[in-house]
Amino acid sequence: MPADRIQVIKKQFMSKMDYKDILIKIRRIVRSINLESKKVQKDFGVSIPQILCLEFLKASPGYQATQRSIRDHLNLNSSTVTGIIGRLEKKGFLARLPKSGDKRVMHIALTSSGDALLERTPDLLQQRLDEKLKGLSADELDRVGGALDLLIEMLEIEVSHADEMPLITGDFESDTTPE
């Protein structure tokens, strides 16, 4: 992001609110994410990244996908996705199916139990945010994106670390659902 754009965004933010208000708003967002994550885990026995994995499978052709496509969609590293898939398979929410003609390639498929779980889970914060972001104008999206870029820069969040984060969850480093 160009330095002059950062200065413009800084002026917009600082002229309208105190820095403490911004910190409070960030804490509210983080708290909401964490509370949702804990509630989903308690009520359904799965993590938000696990739900996002199941939702991806449900939206995929034939309710199947490769581990790589799941990894790319969730924006997580391979070992984390392997853990997510293993735990969901153990609970019967998905199954590994060998590709016909090439037994080395596995497809991950949503099971009827996994589909039933998705029917019971509420819309996640991420889904609600997605719908609201779709309703914003291009200028509004640019302002939100610019403000987030500024926060990321101010927090010195490294790109390589941020690239290994799931979409929106309370557990940013890995999927730590107990076995």
Image (tube, helix red, strand yellow):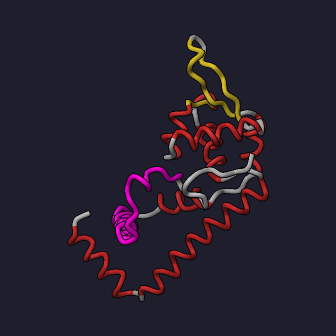
Q: Residue 131, image x and y in percent?
A: 54, 58
Q: Quadrant of residue 117?
A: top right
Residue sitting at x 53%, y 52%: 166
Residue sitting at x 57%, y 70%: 30
Q: Is residue 32 left or right of residue 156?
A: right
Instruction: Please tell me whether residue 179 is drawn above or below residue 159 in the rendered image.
Output: above
Q: Quadrant of residue 56?
A: top right
On-image quarter of the C terminus: top right
**Dominant secondary structure of the residues highlighted in magenta in the image:** helix
Residue sitting at x 77%, y 39%: 91
Which is nearer the eye, 15 or 69?
A: 69
Q: Is residue 32 left or right of residue 2?
A: right
Q: Residue 19, image x and y in percent?
A: 42, 85
Instruction: Please tell me whether residue 33 is drawn above or below residue 63 in the rendered image.
Output: below
Q: Is residue 115 left or right of residue 158?
A: right
Instruction: Please tell me whether residue 141 is drawn above or below residue 77 in the rendered image.
Output: below
Magenta-colored stretch includes residue 177: no
Q: How many marks?
A: 0
Q: Quadrant of residue 27?
A: bottom right
Q: Residue 53, image x and y in percent?
A: 61, 43
On-image quarter of the N terminus: bottom left
Which is nearer the eye, 138 or 173?
A: 173
Instruction: Please tell me whether residue 124 is drawn above or below residue 17 in the rendered image.
Output: above
Magenta residues span: 137-166
Which is nearer the eye, 4 or 121?
A: 4
Q: Residue 15, image x and y in percent?
A: 34, 87
Residue that sits furthest to the top in the current view: 101
